[in-house]
Structures are given as C-alpha cells and as structure tokens.
Image (cartoon, rainbow, N blue to C red):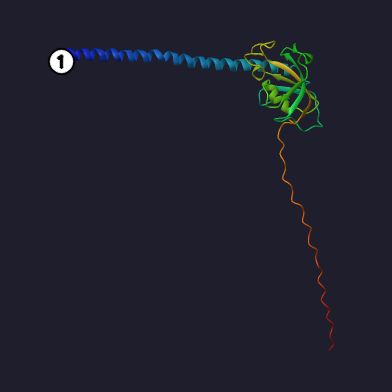
Amino acid sequence: MNYLKLSIYTLLFTVLLSSCKHHEEARRPISRASGTFMKKSADRNKKLVANEEDVIKKIIKSNPKVKYYATPKGYWFYYDERNTNETVAPRKGDIAYFNMEVKDIKGNVIYSESDLGPQTYYVDKQDIMMGLRDGIKRMHKNETVTFLFPSHMAYGYHGDNKKIGTNESLIVTVTLRNFVPDPAAPTVKTAAQPSAVAPKPVVAKPAAPAKKDTLH
C-alpha cells in the first residue's frame, strides 16, 4: 500500500513539474518576439530619418547661393527676409501673429497662405507643428523664414489627416508679422523704492583764531 501511494505521489509530482516547465518555455518566444519587434521598429525609424535628411541635404547642396542654418532640433532654415534691426524674439506666453505656406519636399504647394489665413499662436501653450514650435522662437518681427522639416518635426506618422500624408517632410515659409505679451497674463509688480532722505545740513564750525607770532 505504501509503495502504491509513493508511486501515485511520484507520478503527480512529475506531471506537475512537466506542466510548469512547458508553461515557462511557451512564454519565452513572446518576450523574444516583443524585443525583436521593438528593435526592428527603432532601426526602421532611424533609416527613415536618415533618408529624409539625405533628401534635404541634397536640396541644400543644389542651392549653393542660399545660406542655410542647421538647428540642434534636426531641421534647417533660411531667411527670405531678415530684420537685423530687431533683437527680441517670441518667448513662452507671447501671442504670435503670422502667415505661412506649406509645401511638400518637392516644392508643390499643399496649403497656400490664402488657404490657411492669418495665424494666431500662444507660444508654447498651444498644439502646433513641432518644428514651428521651435522655429517661431528664432524669428523677429517682420521676418520671413523658410523651414525644411523632416517628418518627425512636422506631422510624423499620422500626417494631418487631410492633405499631408504619412512620414512627409515639409517646406514651410513663415512671415512673423508681430508678437505681443499675453494681456491676460498676470503682471509682476516691482517693489516701490523708498523715498530718498534729504541729507542733514552741515553746520560749519567757526574757525579757530589765528595765533599771533611772538617776537623775542
């Protein structure tokens, strides 16, 4: 009887151990597949960015007379009209008023200025194309700048769900007409300066009488 019980317990333990081992082995391919997918996705994105940048660099190279500026954010721009008399640029909370035209990377107009109309933008407080969010803060009043945005600085994978497609690089020309502080923003009052205290008049001390010379 004891031998029968021992055999039953041994059989149950073997079945349980085999089941757990099978379950663990079945989970491994899922984890590996997930890691492989993420790596492939990252590699694909890097290749996409590199290809878009190569196209933009070819455009820049084909226009040697135009001075292009590269930015740390990964886009380029040049001045159509530059205002060197201004030194102040829009900053967070300012209201910027501008016009813009949007083209595809081949120069075909997607949205004209008349299509879009005058634009009003609360700097860093509204959703806007990522490249413009940074680019407008580089501009001065009455300047016109043309930006070359790779898709990751434009509308990315989703496009704008209208005329701009998936992963589409853009050429955007912006004229910054004006920008002003937000009138609704609280103003910081400066502390009143203490009034100046009038100095006390200095009373001149009477001069000591001069000593007479004594002749011996």
Residue drawn at x 41%, y 15% as measured from the top left: 28
- Quarter of the picture containing the C terminus is bottom right
Name the residue at 73% across, 25% down. 136
Residue 215 lies, in percent from the top left, at: 85, 87
Horizontal placement of 20 versus 173: left or right? left
Q: In the image, what residue occupies the spot 60% across and 15% down?
A: 47
- What residue type is disc 1 on? Asn
Residue 46 or residue 10, whichever sits in front: 10
Which quadrant of the figure contains the N terminus?
Answer: top left
* Residue 139 to residue 48: above or below: below
| Residue 17 in sight from this viewpoint | yes
Q: Is residue 119 above or below residue 204?
A: above
Q: Which residue: 72% across, 24% down?
A: 121
Image coordinates of residue 18 in percent, x first then y, are 31, 13
Question: SS class of the residue under badge 1?
Answer: helix
Report the side of 17 relative to 72 (left or right).
Answer: left
Whether 50 is drawn above or below 213: the answer is above
Q: Using the rendered view, name the quadrant where residue 23 is placed.
A: top left
What residue would you read off at disc 1?
Answer: 2
Give percent across and percent down for residue 99.
Answer: 78, 20
